[in-house]
Image (cartoon, rainbow, N blue to C red):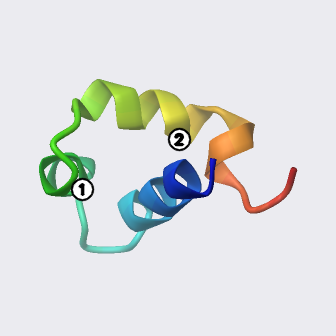
Amino acid sequence: MERLRSICMQARVSGVSVAQVARRYAMNTNLIHKWLRDPRFSSGEQ
């Protein structure tokens, strides 16, 4: 769960695209976009 939150935080950094983060972790960009919409992964709260 922490890894997913970390990936989402990286994708929200200004100047960094979701595609760049997806390539870094060899993931599909659509999966990261899905996580960004999910409050469990997009915030630091539980």
Give the total of numbered labels.
2
Disc 1 on helix, strand or loop?
Answer: helix
Q: Amino acid at mark 1?
A: Val
- Where residue 10 is drawn, which disc sits there? none
Horizontal side of residue 30 vs 26, given as left or right: right
Q: Position of residue 9 (x, y in %)?
A: 50, 64
Give the image location of residue 4, x and y in percent. 52, 48
Spot occupied by residue 22 in the image (x, y as percentages of width and height): 22, 46
Most extreme residue toward the bottom is: 14
Amino acid type of the residue tagged 2 in the rendering: Leu
Farthest residue, direction right: 46
- Is residue 8 toward the left or the right of residue 38 in the image? left
Relative to 45, does residue 34 appear above or below in the rendering? above
Indicate left or right for 46 with 11 as reference. Answer: right
- Tell me the crowding category of disc 2: few under 14, some 14 to 19, or many 20 or more residues within 10 angstroms, Cα based: many
Q: CA distance from mark 1 to mark 2?
A: 12 Å
Residue depicted at 87% across the width and 50% down the height:
46
Density class for disc 1 (Cα within 10 Å; few <14, some 14-19, many ≥20) is many
- The mark that comes first in sequence, 1 or 2, is 1
Residue in view at x 41 percent, y 34 percent: 33
Q: Please name the residue that numbered disc 1 is placed on.
A: 21
Element at label 2: helix
Residue 24's quadrant in the figure?
bottom left
Question: At 64% from the left edge and 45% from the top edge, which residue is drawn?
Answer: 41
Horizontal side of 39 relative to 22 (left or right) equals right
Q: Position of residue 25 (x, y in %)?
A: 22, 51
Q: Residue at x 48, y 54 (%)?
A: 8
For the residue pair 2 and 8, the one nearer the viewer reads as 2
* Number of the label disc, if any, that sits on residue 36: 2
